[in-house]
Image (tube, rainbow, N blue to C red):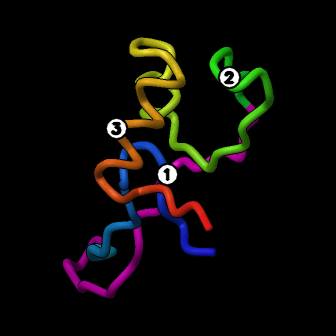
Amino acid sequence: MAKVCQVTGRKRMVGNNVSHSKRRTKRTFDINLKTKKFWSEEEQRFVTLKVSCKGMKNIVKNGLDATVKSALKKGYINIL
């Protein structure tokens, strides 16, 4: 599965390694992804999400159910 946050939609970024002599080579900046279980009060079950640390802060601030609904609306979470 791709390294994409299921709450915020953040992905890896591409940039340059810059040496002391200013030579540039391509590199990737990966996001800090964690696979984490959250308790959903609305569904009375655990929900497992791949979230970045910024996504975890959003869940704490807004609540799990509201955050998942907005992520579904934006298309970040795919439900089969």
Amino acid at dot 3: Ser
Is residue 10 depicted above or below 21 in this figure? above
Q: Which residue is mark 2?
A: 40
First along the sequence among labels 2 and 1: 1
Q: Residue at x 37, y 45 (%)?
A: 8
Q: Which residue is mark 1?
A: 6
Q: Position of residue 2 (x, y in %)?
A: 55, 74
Is residue 69 depicted above or below 29 in this figure? above
Q: Which type of secondary structure does the marked residue at label 3 adopt?
A: helix
Residue 1 falls left or right of residue 69: right
Taking depth in this image into account, of 15 and 12 the one nearest to the observer is 12
Disc 3 from disc 1: Cα separation = 11 Å
Q: Which residue is mark 3?
A: 70
Amino acid at dot 1: Gln
Disc 2 from disc 3: Cα separation = 15 Å
Residue 70 falls left or right of residue 39: left
First along the sequence among labels 3 and 1: 1
Q: Which type of secondary structure does the marked residue at label 1 adopt?
A: loop
Q: Which residues are magenta?
A: 19-37
Q: Residue at x 40, y 15 (%)?
A: 62
Quadrant of image for the N terminus: bottom right
Residue 16 shown in magenta: no
Q: Residue at x 49, y 51 (%)?
A: 6
Q: Residue at x 50, y 14 (%)?
A: 60
First along the sequence among labels 2 and 3: 2
Residue 20 falls left or right of residue 71: left
Q: Position of residue 75 (x, y in %)?
A: 35, 59
